[in-house]
Image: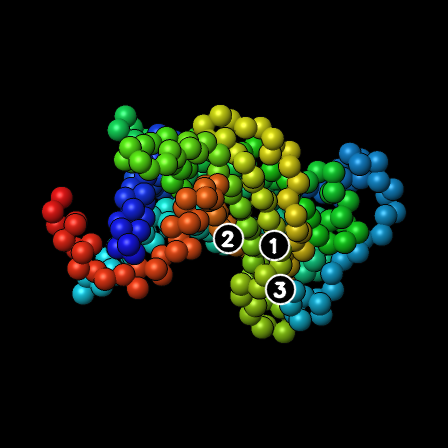
């Protein structure tokens, strides 16, 4: 009877996918930064948030920065695992060597004046039969309501401005009868997604030591029960968990107005690393198949092989 169970499990893994899912053909990923039309300054923040001019600036010290923040069923089992993997997909985006500030500074490594980094946007493009389509896009920006923390805590926060999923990379099952005596698969329309974001900084300290890919910030946005292709706006203006310290400026030398070299601090070099995880809602049948995959190790492969070859 065990081999019959194995055959049933194998047949049930041949689920068809909905038209909005399982799309990765011609995939391309894009991550771009967004900049303020005018660099962010303390005076502008104080005016917009009605902050007191004498507000104490809580700069992170250089010391803190430097310390760092046979058929034997392997074929069938592989097929089942590959099928299960389609319900869970990850992809990564990155953008290196971005500038956080619009100008050099004469003050220090953590001078927060003239921030030009406003946020960033991510896109996943795919190729369908009728051409290129935008499968997923999300835009993030600095949380304006927490601008004050730039000057009091030397950190910033992010919010999600917009998010849309029109085609999922992960597989979502469509309704289907497999055999007259098999159960009916319910159509899946919703997916879950997790977006994890890291900010890494690169700088040279006053002692000439190079610091590379030091993590200064982490953010997370959990997206649950998103109906693919419907333009769900529930995540617009959503705050992300986590925060990021201000990107340090490298110690350098710059030419002044008299064409003389003098000590200065750079424009803050940083990298953005994004991990996107998609998963379709875990149908009981999918879980049953995956949880019992090891039963195939106990099955005599010959009857199943003969059964498959007779088809």
Quadrant location, the N terminus = bottom left
> In the picture, which quadrant includes the C terminus?
top left
Q: Secondary structure at mark 3?
A: strand
Q: Earlier in the sequence, mark 3 or mark 2?
A: 3
Within-10-Å neighbours for mark 1: few <14, some 14–19, many 20+: many
Question: Taking 70 as reference, is 165 left or right?
Answer: right
Q: Is residue 36 above or below residue 86?
A: above
Residue at which label 1 appears: 218
Disc number lying in front (3 or 2): 2
x%, y% of residue 155? 70, 52
Dot 1 lies on which element? Answer: strand
Expressed as whole percent of the image width and height from the top left, the position of residue 221 reads 59, 44
User: What's the distance in space between the residues labelled 3 and 2, CA to CA?
Assistant: 24 Å
**Residue at image point 35% right, 39% down:** 22
Residue 241 visible in the displayed image:
yes
Is disc 2 surrounded by few (<14), some (14 to 19) or many (20+) residues within 10 Å? some
Residue 183 vs residue 205: left or right? left
**Mark 1 or 2 closer to N-term?**
1
Q: Tell me how far mark 1 sits from mark 2, CA to CA.
A: 10 Å
What x and y, as percent, mark residue 110? 70, 58
User: Splitting the image into 4 quarters, where does residue 66 fall?
Assistant: bottom right
Say which residue appears at 76% left-offset and 58% top-offset: 59
1 or 3: mark nearer the eye = 1
Which residue in the rendered view is the most extreme toward the front?
Answer: 1
Question: Marks 1/3: CA distance?
Answer: 25 Å
Residue receiving disc 3 = 251
In the rendered structure, which disc, 1 or 3, sits on the residue that comes first in sequence?
1
Q: Are marks 1 and 3 in contact (CB under 8 Å)?
A: no
Residue 30 x/y as whole percent: 42, 42
The residue pinned by badge 2 equals 273
């Amino acid at each position: 009877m065990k081999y019959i169970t194995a055959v049933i499990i194998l047949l049930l893994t041949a689920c068809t996918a909905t038209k909005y899912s399982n799309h990765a053909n011609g995939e391309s990923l894009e991550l771009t930064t967004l900049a303020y039309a005018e660099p962010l300054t303390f005076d502008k923040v104080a005016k917009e948030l009605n902050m007191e001019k004498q507000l104490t600036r809580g700069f992170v010290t250089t010391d803190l920065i430097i310390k760092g923040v046979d058929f034997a069923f392997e074929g069938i089992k592989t097929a089942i695992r590959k099928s299960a993997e389609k319900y869970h997909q990850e992809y990564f985006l990155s953008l290196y060597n971005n500038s956080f500030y619009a100008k050099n500074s004469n003050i220090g490594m953590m001078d927060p004046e003239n921030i030009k980094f406003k946020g960033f946007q991510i896109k996943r493009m795919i190729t369908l039969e009728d051409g290129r389509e935008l499968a997923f896009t999300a835009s993030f920006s600095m949380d304006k309501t927490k601008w004050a923390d730039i000057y009091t805590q030397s950190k910033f926060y992010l919010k999600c401005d917009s998010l849309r999923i029109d085609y999922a990379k992960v597989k979502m099952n469509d309704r289907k009868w497999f055999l007259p005596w098999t159960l009916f698969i319910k159509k899946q329309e919703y997916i879950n997604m997790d977006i994890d974001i890291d900010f890494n900084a690169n700088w040279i300290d006053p002692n000439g030591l190079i610091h590379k890919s030091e993590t200064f910030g982490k953010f997370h946005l959990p997206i649950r029960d998103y109906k693919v292709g419907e333009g769900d706006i529930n995540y617009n203006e959503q705050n992300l968990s986590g925060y990021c310290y201000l990107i340090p400026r490298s110690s350098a030398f710059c030419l002044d107005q008299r064409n003389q070299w003098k000590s200065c601090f750079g424009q803050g070099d940083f990298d953005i690393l994004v991990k996107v995880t998609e998963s379709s809602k875990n149908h009981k049948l999918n879980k049953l198949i995956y949880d019992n995959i090891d039963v195939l190790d106990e099955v005599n492969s010959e009857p199943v092989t003969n059964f498959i070859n007779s088809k």
